[in-house]
Amino acid sequence: MIGELSTMAKYNLLCTHDHKFEGWFDSETAYLDQKKKKLLLCPMCDDPNVRRALMAPSIVKTKTKESPKKDKKNKVFFNSRQALKNLNNWVTKNCEDVGRNFAKEARKASKGERDDHIFGTATDNEVKKLHDEGIGAIPIPEVKDN
């Protein structure tokens, strides 16, 4: 059987403060689009000035188009759950909860009128309006222990 190349692009990224982190993208175009829209933020300091770091290319072959083995799926799921838990913990410890005033406070933060380390709740429509105004906001799902 002839192998196929994986289509996900993994980049080592750096912010202007030289914080190193990884990013996974569907393609280079997806990376460039997110960078242009300032959707890429350093997870350590929220710096939107992110660039790719030098890295050695890695090509992964898969034998078939079948889905990955079950244990690999579980590992990815576990790592994703843990990453979300870690992100939630960091946000609640390091950011101010502005509750239902999130959209209003995010606008103030984008103008430099307040600290930008905030979290809270916003409707889908409010988040869409923030994005239309060029203000980044993402929902972070709460992960409960089972």
Image (cartoon, rainbow, N blue to C red):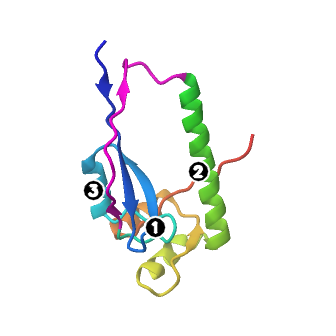
User: Where is residue 3 drawn, in percent x and y?
Assistant: 31, 20
Would you identify the image quadrant in which residue 133 lies?
Answer: bottom left
Disc 3 to disc 2, C-alpha distance? 24 Å
- On whether residue 59 falls in the magenta region, the answer is yes
- Helix or strand or loop: what does disc 2 sit on? helix
Q: Name the residue tied to disc 3.
A: 33
- Report the residue at 36% width, 51% height from top: 11
Q: Amino acid at mark 2?
A: Ala
User: Where is residue 31 drawn, in percent x and y?
Assistant: 30, 53
| Numbered disc in front, either 3 or 1 | 1
Q: Amino acid at mark 3?
A: Asp
User: Where is residue 5 drawn, in percent x and y?
Assistant: 30, 29
Among all residues in the image, which is located at the extreme front?
A: 56
Q: Which residues are drawn in magenta?
A: 50-69
Closer-to-camera residue (100/28): 28
Crowd tier of the residue under label 2, counting other residues whose Cα lies within 10 Å: few below 14, some 14–19, many 20 or above? few
Disc 1 to disc 2, C-alpha distance? 17 Å
Q: Name the residue tied to disc 2.
A: 83
